Amino acid sequence: MSVIGIDFGSESCYVAVAKAGGIETIANDYSLRATPSCIAFSGKNRILGVAAKNQQVTNMKNTVYGLKRLLGRKFRDPHVQKELKILPYNAIETANGNIGIKVNYLGEEHVFSPEQCLAMLITKLKDDSMHALQTPINDCVISVPSYFTNNERKALLDSAAIAGLNVLRLFNETTATALSYGIYKQDLPAPEEKPRNVIFVDCGHSALQVFACAYHKGKLRMLATASDPNFGGRDIDLILAEYFCKEFQTKYKIDARTNARAFTRLLAEVEKIKKQMSANQTTLPLNIECFMEDKDVHGTVKRADMEELCAHLFEKVEVTLASCLEKSGLQVDDIHSVEIVGGSTRIPAIKQRIEKVFQRTPSTTLNQDESVSRGCALQCA
Ligand code: ATP
């Protein structure tokens, strides 16, 4: 019997397990380490993870994602209303004021709660793990953002319970990353010495978390955390998509904002370009065939354009970084290193802001995508 550590991300999930003295990331049914946080329904079956993401464009109304930001909240919560505006599936208010996700499943209309949908995804993570490890799994440790409220935490526990998993602990993503860093370090200071102060910056798809930790051998102390639950890679995707929508309106007289399918395809393409931009300063092409009204569309964008369009977002990142530094009471000279994790910390403009605030080149000692799941698995070991 094994205990698994789950990183529940807003774009994708990772599962890790402590095995043979080390930590192993579990691959899914597509032999991939990341499982998209995506659940879809069809006339015949339920589709989960990679397969759900792959069919999203052709089954928009019945493909559910973005659950991390809906869990444990009421339908009328302004935050939920804002999220629902950018999600293509239908959501209704249930009799008790909760969120009901309306989908067509097995030829009938069904209304599921976000917790039920997430339970389906957790079941998939559990099944893939049992398959990979060839052992039953009953227990897990799941990560939660440090800014999650009690209601959000409770909703996640409900989902795990529906999936038949006993949660040994909900582990803050920040602590999981800090543990991943500290556990194998042989050169941490002795208890009587000055601590090693490390800043961590975790920027994912929908949120930014910054935290400062003080390490001694066998001990870590969280000094401060600052977060921006409203900034992540998806905000850049939305701005780039908006940029192309305007360009296509002038160039081709089509408005992708009026067509959910076209807009979803555009979002997927701009996310790819955004990743290319992280390694490339040249002008990058965007081509989509049969985009709308049988028209093929073409456009270009470069890193400098994105940085200009998103300058206000990067300002916000700087404010959060500076807030963590201030709360920690550390001077920049007291900082040993700044470790970056989460997909969006690959963006050069974010790295530049980190360098500006902490006067250090960020390091990538940790596995940028898997530090949270590894930390959760370590907690189970
Ligand atoms: P969250 O932490 O908000 O719950 P998550 O854990 O699912 O989300 P991550 O997997 O850490 O998020 O990061 C995904 C985000 O990182 C996406 O927005 C993705 O586009 C972005 N990303 C991944 N690689 C790159 C890259 N090379 N350049 C820019 N952005 C990237």
Image (cartoon, rainbow, N blue to C red):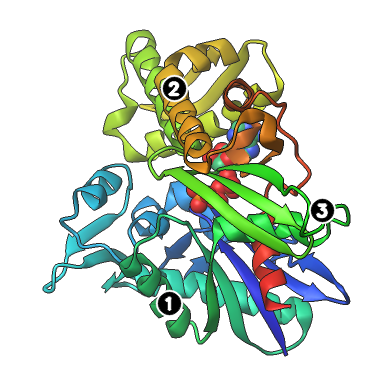
Looking at the picture, which amino acid does disc 3 mark? Answer: Leu
Percent position of residue 8, x then y: 53, 62
Q: If you read the primary sequence from the N terminus, does the residue marked by circle 1 or circle 2 appear first?
A: 1
Q: Circle 1: is it few (<14), some (14-19), or many (20+) Cα within 10 Å?
A: many
Identify the residue under disc 2: 315
Identify the residue under disc 3: 188
Residue at the image position 16 percent from the left and 69 percent from the top: 94
Q: Is residue 206 left or right of residue 14?
A: left
Percent position of residue 85, x then y: 26, 43
> Comparing marks 1 and 3, which lies closer to the viewer?
3
> Comparing marks 3 and 2, which lies closer to the viewer?
3
The Cα atoms of the two marked residues, 1 and 2, are separated by: 35 Å
Question: Helix or strand or loop: what does disc 2 sit on?
Answer: helix
Looking at the picture, which amino acid does disc 1 mark? Answer: Leu
> Does the image show residue 370?
no
Question: Helix or strand or loop: what does disc 3 sit on?
Answer: loop
Identify the residue under disc 1: 157
The Cα atoms of the two marked residues, 3 and 2, are separated by: 34 Å
Residue farthest toward the left in the current orientation of the protein: 95
Q: Is residue 345 left or right of residue 144?
A: right
